[in-house]
Image: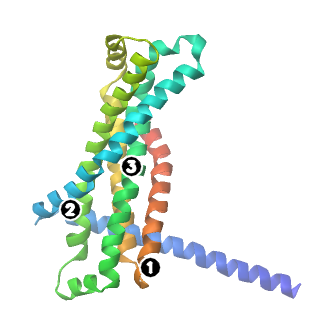
């Protein structure tokens, strides 16, 4: 009995310590998010640095986002037609592709693919500065690391991820058009009429609204892991991996709640 009691007590301490660390990290994330939002809303703004970050986050991610969204639209159109061949679904391919890509698939996939790229890059950059004591030197010179390092990345992500999502919406619909014309023998005008009649402003608002939240989550998680990295190159590597995993989980979990939220608007 003593051994069982000791084992249960040890298990309880481990669980308490684990959940305590999770709570502490959640609190640190919330504090960093609050500081970043406050700094973003107050001048001075280093617009030149922001533009450089937009180029890094948006322009350099265009290729991977374009490939992902085009083939997503193509696969969605093809699978929909093949799965329900006898129900005349091919005549509603424009509706299926446009609604699915704009409201759900493109925002999530762009956030996952691009977020993995930019999130790992943010963590690696800031983490390297942290373990080489550049962040400490910045604080010693009375410079705010959040304003200097986090805010430019957050501002750029909040602009460029929705922009990439909007471009991805168009490319995904064009991918569906390719399959509709070449595989399903539909005319381009029929497809476009179906797309135009199906899409509404609420569809775009839902997708772009999600991308704003995803951009915020990716940036805060990436910068937090960078600012708390320790242990040299190995520590930076672990922080980078944690960023990709945690950001992906946050995107997928929050997508459900955001879908419920936007369904009421």
Q: Quadrant of the C terminus?
A: top left
Residue occupied by mark 1: 235
The answer to whether any part of residue 264 appears in the image is: no
Looking at the image, tell me whether mark 2 or mark 3 is earlier in sequence order. Answer: 2
Q: Which mark is residue 111?
A: 3
**In this rendering, the label closer to the viewer, 1 or 3:** 1
x, y percentage for residue 141? Answer: 16, 86
Q: Earlier in the sequence, mark 1 or mark 3?
A: 3
Q: Please tell me which residue is depicted at 44% across the width and 73% down the height of the picture.
A: 237
Q: Nearer the viewer, residue 185 or 101?
A: 185
Instruction: Name the residue at 85% across, 86% down.
Output: 3
User: Label 2: few (<14), some or many (≥20) within 10 Å?
Assistant: some
Judge whether 21 appears above or below 44 on screen: below
Q: Quadrant of residue 189?
A: top left
Tell me the residue that label 2 is attached to: 40
Left or right for 18, reference 138: right
Residue 210, given in percent of the width and then of the height, sits at 37, 44
Q: Are marks 1 and 3 in contact (CB under 8 Å)?
A: no
Q: Earlier in the sequence, mark 1 or mark 2?
A: 2
1 vs 2, front mark: 1
Q: Secondary structure at mark 1?
A: helix
Q: Cα distance, mark 1 to mark 2?
A: 29 Å
């Amino acid at each position: 009995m003593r051994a069982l009691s000791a084992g249960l007590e040890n298990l309880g301490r481990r669980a308490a310590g684990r959940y305590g660390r999770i709570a502490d990290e959640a609190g640190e994330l919330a504090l960093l998010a609050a500081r970043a939002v406050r700094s973003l809303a107050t001048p001075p703004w280093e617009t030149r640095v922001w533009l450089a970050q937009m180029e890094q986050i948006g322009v350099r991610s265009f290729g991977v986002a374009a490939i992902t969204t085009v083939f997503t639209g193509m696969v969605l159109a093809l699978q929909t037609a093949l799965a329900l061949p006898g129900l005349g679904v091919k005549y509603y391919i424009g509706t299926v592709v446009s609604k699915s890509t704009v409201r759900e698939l493109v925002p999530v996939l762009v956030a996952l693919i691009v977020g993995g790229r930019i999130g790992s890059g943010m963590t690696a950059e800031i983490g390297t500065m942290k373990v080489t004591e550049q962040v400490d030197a910045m604080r010693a010179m009375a410079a705010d690391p959040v304003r200097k390092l986090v805010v430019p990345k957050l501002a750029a992500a909040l602009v460029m991820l929705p922009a990439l999502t909007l471009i991805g919406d168009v490319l995904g619909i064009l991918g569906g058009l390719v399959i509709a014309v070449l595989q399903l023998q539909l005319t381009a005008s029929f497809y476009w009429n179906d797309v135009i009649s199906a899409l509404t402003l609420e569809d775009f608002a839902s997708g772009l609204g999600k991308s704003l939240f995803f951009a915020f989550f990716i940036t805060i998680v990436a910068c937090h892991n960078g600012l708390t990295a320790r242990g040299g190159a190995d520590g930076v590597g672990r922080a980078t991996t944690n960023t990709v995993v945690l950001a992906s989980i946050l995107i997928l979990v929050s997508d459900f709640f955001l879908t419920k939220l936007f369904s009421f608007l």
